[in-house]
Image: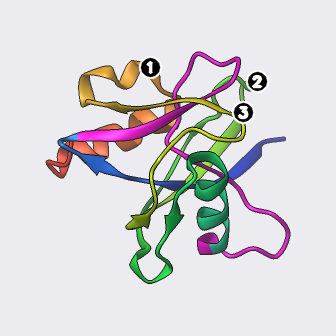
Amino acid sequence: MSLTIDKIAWIEIKDKKILVARSKGKETFYIPGGKREAGESDQQTLIREIEEELSVSLKPESVKYYGTFSAQAHGHSDGIMVQMTCYEGKYDGEMKAASEIDEISWLPFDKMNQTSHVDKIIFKDLRTKGLL
């Protein structure tokens, strides 16, 4: 039986580097975001998760779909997949690690090995579009 973890993620790029976050007790960086709660839309999930993790407010009217990517879920047994639906969007506030996030960083393409399997696919997609 295969299981898919449904996640929503925020793609934020600055100077050809992508914003990533590392949770407390983990070594791997992830593109920020998370799992939806019952009844939440993609946008509601994204706004809530980014506010919880990074202390900034995404502007709902600026949120736009980027793409959906799937891969083996990092740190899970074989056959457990993660599907990440990615959005871009502008934000208000000053970004800082909050909640379970220990560190935020801006990674260039050549540091993608510090991220999860699905994030590497996203890094490659961003690279083909000239964004990383």
Q: Which quarter of the rendering shows the N terminus?
A: top right
Crowding at dot 3, Cα within 10 Å, few <14 / some 14-19 / many 20+, comes out as few
Q: Which residue is mark 2?
A: 77
**Which mark's residue is nearer the viewer, 3 or 2?**
2
> How far apart are labels 1 and 2 at the CA level?
19 Å
What label does residue 79 carry, if any?
Answer: 3
Dot 2 falls on a residue whose secondary structure is loop
Report x, y in % for residue 50.
58, 55
The kind of secondary structure element at disc 1 is helix
Q: Which residues are magenta?
A: 17-43
Residue in the picture at 61% in, 58% down: 51
User: Label 2 near label 3: C-beta < 8 Å?
Assistant: yes
Examine the rendered structure and indicate whether residue 35 appears above or below residue 98. Answer: below
Q: Report the front residue among 9 and 67.
A: 9
Q: Report which residue position mark 1 lands on.
A: 114
User: Is 101 in front, or is 85?
Assistant: 101
